[in-house]
Image (spheres, rainbow, N blue to C red):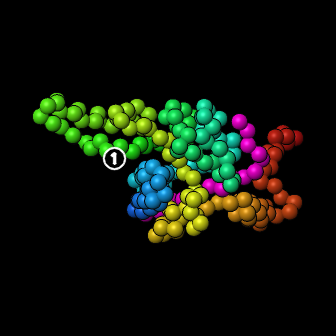
Amino acid sequence: MSFKNAMNQYVIADPKLCIGCNTCMASCSQEHQLHGLQSAPRLQVMRNRLDSAPVMCHQCEDAPCAQVCPVNAITRENNAIHLNESLCVSCKLCGLACPFGAITFSGSTPLDIPRDCNTAKALPAPRPPRAISPFLDCVPGVRAVAVKCDLCSFSPDGPACIKTCPTQAITLVTASVSENASQQKRLNAMNVFPAGLTSFSAPDTEAKQ
């Protein structure tokens, strides 16, 4: 599978503005659940001693996840990489192929089979095993479905994480935004190194007589 040479849109976060409140994760989960999709958040806030920032799908130009999907459930649409949950067959290859760990797996428990439904005529139902990893966990009756950032393409207001971030740490990068940033970098470089000067100079290695 190959994609046209065009820049995909993607979402980035500024760790200097992020306060680690997890509001983006909560809004992402709620927004997708309201549209009948898996409620697992499509981004994960990561923290270290000083900073925090959500990690999400990079919307790769030549997406490895799409390359390995055996049922073409991952495609490029509207300048982004989208995953069709209805086509997912739970092979988990996309998550293994993603170099950024931006794909996780979720599943909904059937509504007509309540948990711990024990009767006097049957042995108690075993409890779900302890969670280890989305790639290793297997819960009886629950089909693992791949979930990744889709930029909330179903919403006319755009990504929910951007709308709800209290510090405006999350932004959507489009082709025009990227081009403007590149032009600004070139202008900054010209100001640092005026015409006639270069950032590198060859050392004088000639021995003085």
Q: Position of residue 128 (x, y in %)?
A: 28, 36
In the picture provided, is 90 more to the left or to the right than 124?
A: right
Secondary structure that dominates the magenta span: loop
User: In the rendered image, which quarter is residue 113 located in?
Assistant: top left
Q: Is residue 188 visible?
A: no
Locate residue 52: give its quadrant. bottom left
Q: Residue at x 87, y 60 (%)?
A: 196
> As rendered, which of 82 and 133 lies closer to the eye?
82
Residue 56 magenta-highlighted: no
Residue found at the far left of this picture: 120
Image-quadrant location for residue 51: bottom left
Q: Specify the segment rendered in magenta.
A: 1-19
- What residue lies at 12% left-to-right and 34% top-to-bottom? 120
Judge from the rendering whether residue 65 lies leftward or rightward of residue 108; answer left or right: right
Q: Which residue is mark 1?
A: 111
Q: Which residue shows up at 65% across the image and 35% down it?
A: 67
User: Quick one: SS at disc 1?
Assistant: loop
- Look at label 1 and name its amino acid: Leu
Residue 187 seen anywhere in this rendered image of the structure: yes
Q: Position of residue 178 (x, y in %)?
A: 71, 60
Residue 6 among those drawn in magenta:
yes
Above or below 102: residue 71? above
Image-based side of 107 in relation to 17, left or right: left
Please state the horizontal and vertical placement of residue 73, each as a whole percent of the image.
Answer: 60, 40
Q: Quadrant of the C terminus?
A: top right
Q: In the drawing, does residue 129 fall left or right of residue 191?
A: left
Give neighbour class at mark 1: few <14, some 14-19, many 20+ (Cα, 10 Å).
Answer: few
Picture coordinates of residue 184 (x, y %)?
Answer: 73, 65
Task: Give the residue drawn at x 42%, y 37%.
Answer: 143
Please state which of residues 80 and 180 is positioned toward the viewer in this rendering. Answer: 80
